[in-house]
Amino acid sequence: MYGRVRALVIKELLAVLRDRQSRIALVMPPILMLTIFAFAATLEVKSVDLAVLNQDGGQASIELIQRFAGAPFFTNVFFLHGVQEIAPALENERAMAVLVFDQTFSRDVAAGRPARVQMLLDGRRSNTAQIVQGYASRILERYTQDLAERHDLPGPPATLTARNWFNPNLDYLWYTVPNLIGLLSMSVGLLVTSLSVARERELGTYDQLLVTPLSPREILAGKTIPAMIMGLAEGFLITAVAIGCFRIPFAGSFPVLAASLFLFMLSVVGFGLFISSVCNTQQQAILGTFTFMIPAALLSGFATPIETMPEFLQIVSLANPLRHFLVAIRGILLKAMPFPMVLETIWPLVPIAAVTLTLAGWFFRKGLK
Amino acid sequence: MNARIARRLAAIMVKESLQILRDPSSILIGFILPVFLTLLSGYSTNLDLTNLPVGLVLEDTSPEARSLAAAFSASTAFDVHPGRDRREFAEDLTRGRLRGLVVIPQTFGRDLSRADASVPFQVIADGSEPNTATFLQNYAQGVWLSWMEIRAENNGQTFTRAVELVPRTWFNQELLSLNGLLPGGMAINLTLIGALLTALVVAREWERGTMEALLATPIGPLELLAGKLIPYFVLGLGALFICMVITLAVFHVPYRGSVSALLVVSSVFLISALNLGLFISTAAKNQFVASQIAILSAFLPSYFLSGYVFEPSGMPLAVRLLTHVIAAKYYVSCLKTLFLAGDAWPLLWPNIGGMAAIAAVLLGLTLLKTRRRVA
């Protein structure tokens, strides 16, 4: 049995790796995607265009505008010359936000009356709007404190000290790169497996495989092992690039990472082989992979957090291997998550792999009919 | 002459339409996937963070400390888990069960009563998810400021908040992220139909050799391309209609533009996507390579580089330049504006121009490649 499986493993590896174009297709696109998407997949807000309508012209408003212009966050601050210019500026995306000082602003500040600054935000970009608003209110808060100090008034007594653990400077790359390790390893793992059976069915070589002495279980092993070898190699390559080129911290331990990557790839290969086993043509397999990949990416907690999803989708997402792996990989790389805690997160990968591989093996046999 | 062109064109279009209707994979991409994707992204993509699980460490038992703790518990932004020791919570933060900690120190009540002392009151966020961390800090700041205000008023003082920011959001007053995400998601659906489906179908024609057979007929290359594109164009508009109905009826996203503007913008985008699909299929050797290129050059960029979720303004210059050759970027901008702001033509025209330029370049490349491939 060992020899038969070994022969099949070698055949499968050769089928993919013999072709130069396929070898390149396995290595280059994931690295390229990692580089581009690591910088693209960011919800960070920087270089904001801010329009100012100053109907006041007094000292206080000018000082405050200078503070906004001096903040690195607002790279482009420009002036509007009338209320009628507000709507076009926002509508045509010339400005993300408009700061409006009314005529009495500086007088109110000088007299110690509460003064108001209006900020109009572009709600089409709702996430950015909220971050810009938070940033602006912090500038005003600091200004209020300075005013209080200048006039010897008691300022707000307590200050809020904000701190971020695991990623003190909130570097966005530390978030996207670990997530991309999961997403890209999954896409390569699916790519290698989902076509393997469908291609043989389409070309007719699958029937030849079935008439060999190999049992369905041996065929399953012969298809799983090479996919695992390639998928794991890919996963380690991407992780190495992430740590070597992107300087993502590696706080945890390597054996823990290897164990989680192994379980993750096993469940991904399970899904890939299952898709492949129910498809008759390559085109069906490609579309099937796609229909699996999109929900898996959406329900992984990468772009949007899981806890904001409705209850039933949170339950559906439990069957998604990527969801469990992303928590583990972020934990291992950034938080030095210890092994028992990692196990707590990734144990669902074991039943996922068991179910998908069993189903795949069962559908392999259907080819005999 | 014209009648002959029309007849040839009609023949190709009938052939393509029949092929679409008889092929289950076309039906899957053209009708089922738009419904599935719109519903799924409508329910799953939500950036509006409420009920963030945070641990509240109350080291002080003074009335002020307890009142601040109550203010955090009452806020809808947080789902507060109270405790007395911050080490208890550190593990849950590592596990990802908590998004942050709020620490009210032992000296809080005492320091608060002294006018000059600054009270170190701490908010610790899980920085491994930076966007959530930013929101957590902003929300905490908000709770803190309003608590201070109420406290000052209760003590009969006026709170010295000399300058106040009055924010107002246009186009999307409740700041629902879904209102921007769903219109943008339509661009992804149309990319799938335009680029992926066309690439697969035409690549199959090359793979099986039927493309050469078509080229050997009296049809000219331009007529052939047009005859192939028009049925998929109609399919794309059908998918657009499906997405619109779900977006408006199920998720109640407002639509403030005109129907004609939507049709103009979507048509130009579809033409550029279809041309991309045609170009991919002409350049690729087989269906497998075509599908890989379509996913790499059309689907993934339309997700990551279009401004659908991730804003180009936050990206480094090189990546931002790259977004300019992605047609979906212009389309997403148009869609968000049409849905939430209305017909802002000064914004729409440059975007239409961008998409048209991309379409023209792709069409030229396809014609060049088709001729060379046959020769």
Image (cartoon, rainbow, N blue to C red):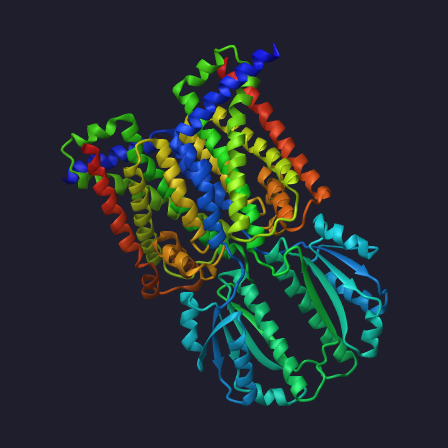
Left or right of residue B361, residue A236 in this image: left
Quarter of the picture containing the N terminus of chain A is: top left
Picture coordinates of residue B51, whole percent (x, y): 49, 68
Picture coordinates of residue A178, whole percent (x, y): 45, 54
Picture coordinates of residue A304, whole percent (x, y): 49, 56
Q: Does residue A188 appear in the picture of this structure?
A: yes
Picture coordinates of residue B207, whole percent (x, y): 40, 22
* Tag count: 0
Q: Does residue A221 appear in the picture of this structure?
A: no
Quarter of the picture containing the C terminus of chain A is: top left
Q: Is residue A94 above or below residue B15?
A: below
Q: Nearer the viewer, residue B14 or A279?
A: B14
Residue pictured at 59% horizontal, 12% vertical? B3
